[in-house]
Image (spheres, grey):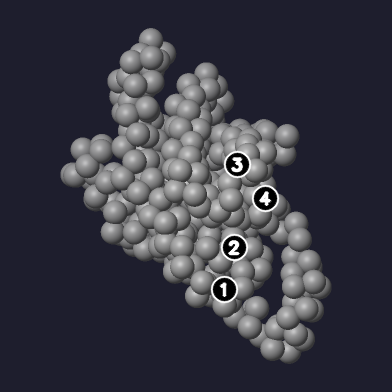
Amino acid sequence: MWVILCMIAGVLIGRFLPQVPEFLNRLEYAKVSVPMAVLIWLMIYPMMMKVDFRSVRNVGRNPKGLFVTWAVNWLIKPFTMYGVASLFFFVVFKAFITPDLATEYLAGAVLLGAAPCTAMVFVWSTLTKGDPAYTVVQVATNDLIILVAFVPIVKFLLGVSNVAVPWDTLILSVVLFVVIPLAAGILTRYLVTKRKGRDYFENTFTKKFDGITTIGLLLTLILIFAFQGNTILENPLHIVLIAVPLVLQTLFIFAVAYLTCRILRLPHNIAAPAGMIGASNFFELAVAAAIALFGTSSPAALAATVGVLTEVPVMLFLVSIANKTKKHFQ
């Protein structure tokens, strides 16, 4: 309900108060929206504080979860996203989408598929009672792989070798959305624990930040849909058409990762986050890259934005599935 309300609010702002997104659009550095970065930082920082990094040393005892995460995210997901999106945009929905539009929608979908989740996966992991320290390692290693694999995979799948992909946008996005909140969380935990003790930090201090993550997410959605307000109003049917392959891809990838963990007899607190990381997307990076490559009002940026709309309700559905099937894991 809140996602839909934020979408409506953002579209109305973009339609009737266009000067607001126009002003915010000017606040950018290296093609990355500064207001967006601040909101994402607010969303991630409270979660980063809650992770006890001393438990990371135990992760090496069970590396299978990392192997599943890497294989699904980089050897399977980008290519199945390309295949599913191509099938629907160029074949199934051929009567509704022109070839030029289909190409750009495909570009937005591939940008989503080549960017595994970084921020929201901590929410999904928490909701499934996943191992927070293990989740951090899964996400951190993905962020390192993004620096090497994201650009060549996108170029290969889309055949856009002649498009100059902005490395500064990619690297700055990772710094803003991962490195800064992670470092701030570690520093905050260390300083507060040193002064007040661990019990105060975990039972009192962190509770002061309850709700900030949700507020950051909702404001981020409003901002994204404000940027795309007119485009969405001009193509309402296309929102549904774009959403169909994105949802099917999300369900498929979750099933692959989650069932693989079950076959490997991994514990549920590792299997659930592994499935969530593969299924969800680093939509902040995908939207930023789509805007940098194709423009703020481009069909590619719209496709990446639809990924935001579909992600929250679909991922909550998968959280429910993971929690209900916990009994099937060790």
The span from disc 1 to disc 3 (Cα, nearest Å) is 25 Å
Q: Nearer the viewer, residue 36 or 142?
A: 142
Q: Kindly report which numbered mark, 2 or 1, lies closer to the viewer in this rendering.
A: 1
What label does residue 277 carry, if any?
Answer: none
Q: Earlier in the sequence, mark 2 or mark 4?
A: 4
What amino acid type is highlighted by mark number 2?
A: Pro
Q: Which residue is mark 2?
A: 132
What amino acid type is highlighted by mark number 1?
A: Ser
> Measured from the top left, where is residue 297 in percent x and y?
44, 37
Q: Earlier in the sequence, mark 2 or mark 1?
A: 1
Q: Kindly report which numbered mark, 1 or 4, lies closer to the viewer in this rendering.
A: 1
Q: Which residue is mark 1?
A: 55
Q: Quadrant of residue 154?
A: top left
The residue furthest top is: 95
Q: Which residue is mark 3?
A: 328
Q: Which residue is mark 4?
A: 127
Residue at 46% x, 63% y is 62
> Measured from the top left, where is residue 133 in percent x and y?
56, 66
Q: Classify mark 1: helix, strand or loop.
A: helix
What amino acid type is highlighted by mark number 3?
A: His
Residue 279 showing in the rendered view: no
Q: Kindly report which numbered mark, 1 or 3, lies closer to the viewer in this rendering.
A: 3
Query: In the rendered view, does 70 fall on the left or right side of 318?
Result: left
What amino acid type is highlighted by mark number 4?
A: Leu
* Mark 2 neighbour class, 10 Å CA radius: few under 14, some 14 to 19, many 20 or more: many
Q: Earlier in the sequence, mark 3 or mark 2?
A: 2
The span from disc 1 to disc 4 (Cα, nearest Å) is 19 Å
236 vs 156: above or below? above
Q: Earlier in the sequence, mark 4 or mark 3?
A: 4
